[in-house]
Image: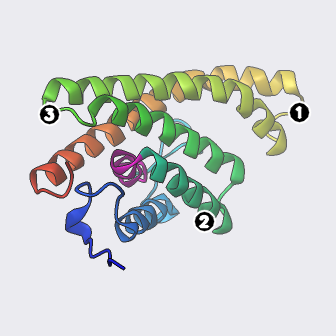
């Protein structure tokens, strides 16, 4: 019976990523989601900037199959730590709409800036479009649950008023996360940790 002696340095060189590396990156994503590492969006402080998407993008780069398990753990643990389930579900969808297009466009390509630029641009646009649709569906109900609105029509009108902030926030965090992920992946590839 052969033993698996893969180490962190073997990430990407084998068919499946190291469980220790994926667990570590998932744990890092959870830590980066903690309130201590969040920066409120100035115009609407309910929206928070964090960098949890960067380790999640690296996991997606390693394996999209592993990413689905990792993002599920990220969601469950974050909710268990007391974070808002609706907000966390939206966060998972936002990060997925950023990470998956980024990885599909950049993975397997030689290290070329044009593919990285395309990946950043497309993943940011997909995130903005996805979160626009999701916010139009979910936010009115969330506003009613939070008792910030008295009825659905009032909640929907408030949601429409928030849409410019939804666009700006998601475009800015999409650019930040995807750019940092691409640069981190570039460094890890050059160091030989990723292929």
Residue 67 at x, y percent in the picture: 47, 50
Magenta highlight range: 52-63
Q: Point out the frontmost of discs 3 and 1.
A: 3
In-front residue for pair 67/92:
67
How many numbered markers are drawn? 3
In this rendering, would 52 be left or right of 146? left
- Residue name at image x 22 percent, y 30 percent: 116
Residue 129 at x, y percent in the picture: 52, 21
Name the residue tied to disc 1: 150
In-front residue for pair 111/160:
111
Residue 148 at x, y percent in the picture: 79, 39
Answer with the quarter of the image where residue 173 lies.
Answer: top left
For marks 3 and 1, give the CA distance: 54 Å
Instruction: Please say if 74 is above or below 67.
Output: below
Q: Which mark is residue 110?
A: 3
- Residue name at image x 50 percent, y 40 percent: 96
In-front residue for pair 154/82:
82
Q: Which mark is residue 77?
A: 2
In this rendering, would 112 be left or right of 121? left
In this rendering, would 169 be left or right of 190? right
Q: Point out the frontmost of discs 1 and 2.
A: 2
Main SS class of the magenta portion in the image = helix
For marks 1 and 2, give the CA distance: 32 Å
Q: Which residue is most to the left?
A: 190
Answer with the quarter of the image where residue 17 lies.
Answer: bottom left
Q: Are marks 2 and 3 in contact (CB under 8 Å)?
A: no
Callout 2: helix, strand or loop? helix
Residue 98 at x, y percent in the picture: 43, 35
């Amino acid at each position: 019976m052969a033993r698996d002696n893969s180490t962190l340095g073997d990430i990407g060189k084998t068919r499946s990523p190291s469980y220790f590396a994926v667990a570590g990156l998932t744990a890092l994503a959870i830590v980066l989601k903690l309130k201590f590492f969040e920066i409120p969006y100035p115009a609407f402080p309910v929206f928070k900037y964090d960098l949890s998407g960067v380790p999640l993008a690296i996991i997606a780069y390693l394996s999209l199959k592993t990413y689905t398990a990792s993002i599920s753990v990220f969601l469950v643990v974050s909710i268990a730590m007391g974070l808002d389930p609706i907000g966390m579900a939206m966060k998972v969808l936002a990060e997925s709409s950023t990470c998956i297009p980024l990885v599909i466009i950049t993975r397997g390509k030689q290290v070329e800036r044009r593919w990285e630029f395309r990946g950043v641009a497309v993943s940011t646009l997909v995130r903005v479009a996805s979160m626009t649709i999701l916010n139009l569906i979910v936010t009115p109900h969330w506003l009613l649950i939070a008792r910030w609105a008295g009825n659905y029509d009032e909640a929907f009108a408030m949601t429409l008023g928030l849409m410019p902030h939804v666009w700006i926030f998601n475009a800015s965090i999409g650019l930040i996360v995807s750019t940092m992920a691409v640069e981190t992946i570039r460094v890890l590839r050059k160091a030989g940790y990723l292929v």
